[in-house]
Amino acid sequence: MKKIPVWLLAVILAAGTLASCASDGAAEGSAADSTEGNSSSQSSLSIVTTIFPIYDWVVNITGSSENVVFLESSGTDLHSFEPTANDILTISEADIFIYIGGESDSWVDNAVNAVSNDGLICLSLMDTATVYEEETVEGMEAEEEEEAGDEDETEYDEHIWLSLKNAEKAVNAITDAVCSADSANEELYRGNADAYIEQLRELDLKYEEMVEASSRDTLLFADRFPFRYLTEDYGLEYYAAFAGCSAESEASFETISFLIEKAKELELEYVLIIDGSDGKIADTVCSESGASVLTVNSCQSVTEDDLNSGITYLSIMEDNLEIFREALN
């Protein structure tokens, strides 16, 4: 659990008046200005987001990347992200702060409680989504025992953005927050949101049609497995080495053997890994089963360079659609 000591936050925020100017714009508009406003009236809201999908949703709703901050634009995913002093100052000066709200965001409570900004709107997207508990399926490597006292604590899968249905819920919640903070531009925001939701629904339908037309209904991830929400949305089965984005890095002989035998049993042509994987488990599974490797993008390691190249949440999910299509046929 990533906690920030309250005393440290106090020191950081006490220096805000001196350091805030230096931090202005440091992480703003990371997507360049590829998204233009859809109205001559443009938002002046300062909105801070943690991960890429949230950033991209906000840009589409507001019609501009101006004054939208993407904290994790270095490519560090939410599971290992640690906020800097400038990050905390940026949040303290924002109108809206939007984050996922799972275990990896446990630092948020301390940060927000220390912020002396009574007008700050904070939005946890897990509060708006259909959320599933973490699960361990057959053959999956179990995580190490939790610290004493945490054994009975329910863990929820944080990867809600990999469901297009949850993405729609998130966009609606973000739109409500933005309209609450800037009612003068509500018509613009809601119009942009409606147009974007239509694109989400069209892509969701493509996924449904792809799964219905596929000859298989099972995916095998020789890797971590952040795609639980996607498989739930479309009724797919899965096997994986690890749950979610487990902190475990080494799979046991038993887990690897299970995945090899399952790939053979199902006569799979492809096994899957996620972006950033070293592929070692997959290489072993493929060498023994004759399958090949495909990589899907979990939206967790998007960098500022990726943004500048024009990548979007929808383009990533479109690319994933074609990879899943290949894996299921």
Image (tube, grey):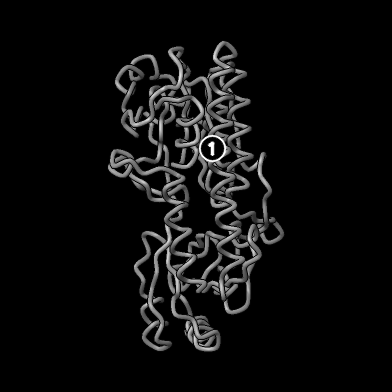
**Which residue occupies 58% across, 79% down?**
139
> Residue 133 falls in which quadrant of the image?
bottom right
| Between 212 and 226, the one nearer to me in the picture | 212
The percent coordinates of residue 235 (x first, y second) are 66, 65
> Residue 201 falls in which quadrant of the image?
top right
Q: Residue furthest right?
A: 152
* Vertical placement of residue 183 versus 72, above or below: above
> Residue type at mark 1?
Tyr
* Vertical placement of residue 321 versus 203, above or below: below
Query: How many neighbours does mark 1 have within 10 angstroms: few (below 14), some (14-19), or many (20 or more)?
Result: some
* Vertical placement of residue 253 versus 161, above or below: below
**Which residue occupies 32% across, 23% down?**
25
User: Would residue 65 be seen by someone viewing this image from the given angle?
Assistant: yes
| Between 183 and 131, the one nearer to me in the picture | 183
The percent coordinates of residue 54 (x first, y second) are 50, 38
Tally of numbered discs: 1
Residue carrying label 1? 99
**Which residue occupies 45% across, 52% down?**
318
* Vertical placement of residue 257 versus 204, above or below: below
Q: Would residue 152 appear left or right of 220 to someone viewing this image? A: right
User: Would residue 93 be seen by someone viewing this image from the given angle?
Assistant: no
| Between 266 and 153, the one nearer to me in the picture | 266
Q: Would residue 163 appear left or right of 317 to someone viewing this image? A: right
**Which residue occupies 53% across, 59% down?**
226
The percent coordinates of residue 107 (x first, y second) are 52, 40
Q: Regarding mark 1 in the picture, which secondary structure is present there?
A: strand
The percent coordinates of residue 78 (x first, y second) are 46, 47
